[in-house]
Image (cartoon, rainbow, N blue to C red):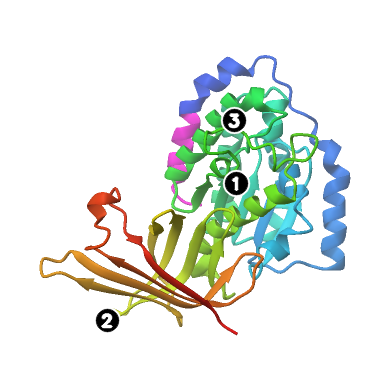
Amino acid sequence: MKNSNNHLLFALLLTPFLNSFAHGQIQPDPARYEASIERFENADFISPPSKNAILLVGSSSIGFWNDDAPADLAPLNIIPRGFGGSVMNDLLHYYERVILKYAPRAIVLYEGDNDLAWGLSPATILNQLVSLIANLDRDLPETRLYLLDIKPSIARSHLWVLAEEVNNGFAEIAKTDSNIFHINMSKFLLDENGDIRKDIYLPDDLHLNDAGYDIWAEVIKAALTLHEADFSSELIGTRFYNQTKQLISDCVELINDPENRKYTLGFLLTSSGLQLSDFDSRSRDSNCRDTLEVIFTKDGAVQQATFSSSTLYIHKGEGPYSLNAEHHSNRLPISQTGGSFVFDSIEAVLIK
């Protein structure tokens, strides 16, 4: 972590709210998870996890995913350590045994859901998160932290206003540190009207079913593909996430660039085509297999851009595909697309 002074400032800003809500709040006893932590430790003894992996930690939304997450996020190296029903304070209590011992290069964290159900305030949750980040600042300063939104659910719809308050707090904390990322999971679990989707939950109306976890996995993998590519020895490759309508290319070479720069690109699939949504520099030199060729007008504006890949994989589908997508200012000027570059001429062919 970085910018710990900003985290401290954020905590100080929360203090008045924390004090106003503190009365009557009861933290559940972390000892209720001693057996779960011991099971993790026994598993580590039998099969020690590798260092420099990505740690998944948090409550049952992670715990229900423990078995499937390594395959869903492959080829990334994953350590799944979700334990159902946990709250943010449990992570603080078991910090050394469930976080620090793994020395992860990145952490994907899901907490806050059960905290609200216990009657804990948003301010308490965010203040405890700041305490956890302070531990990471001290012990694992280079570790990246991915904060998952509290997900909407039918069973806890009465808590959604408070959940949104926590999610907004997660987003604000992420702005204070270049190593903290907020994953806006909730928007992918709502329908077009902003209502909770009933088709992606188990009969308990709280936990995700297989269709829900398809979305969950794609959103997380898209974020990790985009931000972890520079730090991965694994070849993540170009991926299209059909549930979230996202395409991520983790290593793109800019054609005819005298500085030979590399980039990570993200696209959203819209009714008009592939809309460029992320364009980030990639610091690590790599043998990129995707290309972006840009042709400029005399005044320096983009006239035409062509993205090409021969390694496009569709999540839970076959592949690879070869893909060519083209943007041309004459067909779809950015003045008509809200300033976004839309690649509206798309050709994809399955490579046999």
Q: Residue at x 50, y 50 (%)?
A: 180
165 horizontally vs 37: left or right: left
Identify the residue position indicated by label 3 in the image. 163
Q: Residue furthest left?
A: 299
Identify the residue position indicated by label 1 in the image. 135
Q: Amino acid under label 3? A: Ala
Q: How far from the left and from the top, in percent, is residue 195? A: 58, 32
- Of the numbered discs 1 and 3, the one sitting upstream in the chain is 1
Would residue 179 be seen by someone viewing this image from the given angle? Answer: yes
Q: How far from the left and from the top, in percent, is residue 113? A: 67, 34
* Label 1, label 3: how far apart the Cα atoms are: 24 Å
Q: Amino acid under label 1? A: Asn
- Of the numbered discs 3 and 2, the one sitting upstream in the chain is 3
Q: Quadrant of residue 267?
A: bottom left
Residue 141 inside the magenta-drawn segment: no
- Using the image, tell me which numbered label, if any, was put on residue 240: none
Q: Nearer the viewer, mark 2 or mark 1?
A: 2
Q: Residue at x 50, y 26 (%)?
A: 14
Residue 6 inside the magenta-drawn segment: yes
Q: Quadrant of residue 159?
A: top right
Q: How far from the left and from the top, in percent, is residue 112? A: 65, 35
Residue extent of the magenta highlight: 1-12
- Contact (CB < 8 A) between labels 1 and 3? no
